[in-house]
Amino acid sequence: MKMVKLGEVSKFVRGITFKPGDVEDAGPENVGCLRTKNVQAELDLRDVLSVPTRLVKRQEQYVQHGDVLISSANSWNLVGKCSWIPALDRPTSFGGFVTLLRANRSLVDARYLYHWFSSDRTQRVMRSFGSQTTNIANLNLKRAGDTELPLPSSDEQRRIAEILDKADALRAQRRQTIAHLETLAQSIFHEMFGTPTESAGGEELGEILSSIDSGTSPVAEDRSARPDEWGVLKVSAVTSQTFIESENKALMASAPVVRNEVRAGDVLFTRKNTPNLVAAVAIVRTTRPRLLIPDLVFRLNIADRERLHPEYLQAVLSNPAKRSSIQRLSGGSAASMSNISKAKLAKVKIPVPAFSLQQTFATRIAAVERLKEQHQRHLTELDTLFASLQHRAFTGQL
């Protein structure tokens, strides 16, 4: 199969520069502005900023249907993550922490290019091009552009893209179902407890937690730990606000700090991350043994579990209104990593309703979680199938 350099059939377009004061309400005199936050499995359009049109210096800085939006400055594990740009209903640009990959459509099919770039193998290669600066990894666009991709005939590109599109649609349907169940969990919380506003008061975390544990970051290998090995969690194990035990790295020869081992029932909190990902909270419902908390994650230890239920604690801290207020406590800037100290977190107040109400909430959430687990297992199976199809597609075996 013919091989070409990525830069020969497409180009990278850098985003616009703007300041926090440039953000405005949506209107005819401004444009949408996409950020790393919007780069998800499907482009997330729930929180798109608006900035003055004058900040868009070049026509090419407007996104086009069929572009690929890449997270090019982020924590290392997210560098290279990408989203397909669908048709949008307003003029939209993008910020400096993301980059567009735009296909030369006379040479390469845009969907074929997207599937190649988003494939597991290409994503690993792109992450390896991340240069570390101030805790942020930056994608090396020169090296990325020199990466070779297989380029069959136009008809074959379209055939491959159509096969992968059909398989990907099944995954998207499953993800949508899981997202609806997550929304249902939020709705249950709102129905039972309302919105935990700052003005509502409550009790300080420092008064209802026995301690806030800090993890450590021992030297680890660039692979997941085997079942019989000790591993240390990556921050991505918590970032989605659902505990993902597979997001870990195998511990090297150093002795594990056993007191930092993750336990079922733990409530984990990301103390340091990029501004939009800091203050994520996940409850550990089940876990394999021999996993350690990293130094970027706190463990919130409840003083009295007959007064405060871990399911309620996770839900109240994850509530968008409460999480947003906690994120504002963080130090650091958008150009670095935001960090929340123990002292500031301990001062956060949450309402503490009757424990019987918390138990009822936990029971209802358990039913939702069982459904989510079923759909997640099916999604994992589809992901495995899709990865196999991608491998075959880009090695001439499909």
Image (cartoon, grey):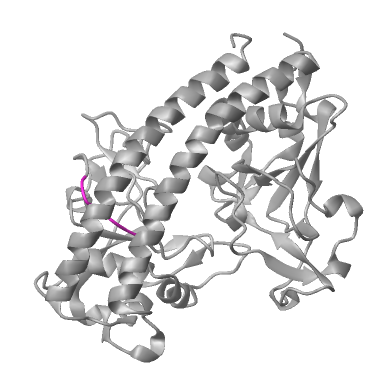
Is residue 95 shown to the viewer in this render? yes
Displayed quadrant of residue 233: top left
Q: Dividing the image into 4 quarters, which one contains the N terminus? A: top right
Residue 354 rendering spot, x and y as whole percentages: 15, 80
Residue 295 rendering spot, x and y as whole percentages: 36, 56
Residue 349 rendering spot, x and y as whole percentages: 32, 83
Tell me where the magenta segment starts and ends, as one range: 281-286
Q: Residue at x 78, y 13 (%)?
A: 153
State left or right for residue 266 relative to residue 51. Answer: left
Whether residue 74 is in magenta: the answer is no
State left or right for residue 241 relative to residue 63. Answer: left
Residue 63 rendering spot, x and y as whole percentages: 79, 51
Q: Residue at x 58, y 57 (%)?
A: 37
Whether residue 283 is in magenta: the answer is yes
Which residue is most to the right?
A: 58
> Number of marks in the image?
0
Q: Residue at x 83, y 53 (%)?
A: 61
Displayed quadrant of residue 357: bottom left
Is residue 119 shown to the viewer in this render? no
Q: Residue at x 63, y 36 (%)?
A: 129
* Relative vertical location of residue 46 with respect to residue 258 in this rendering, above or below: below
State left or right for residue 24 relative to residue 217. Answer: right
Q: Dividing the image into 4 quarters, which one contains the C terminus? A: top right
State left or right for residue 207 relative to residue 108. Answer: left
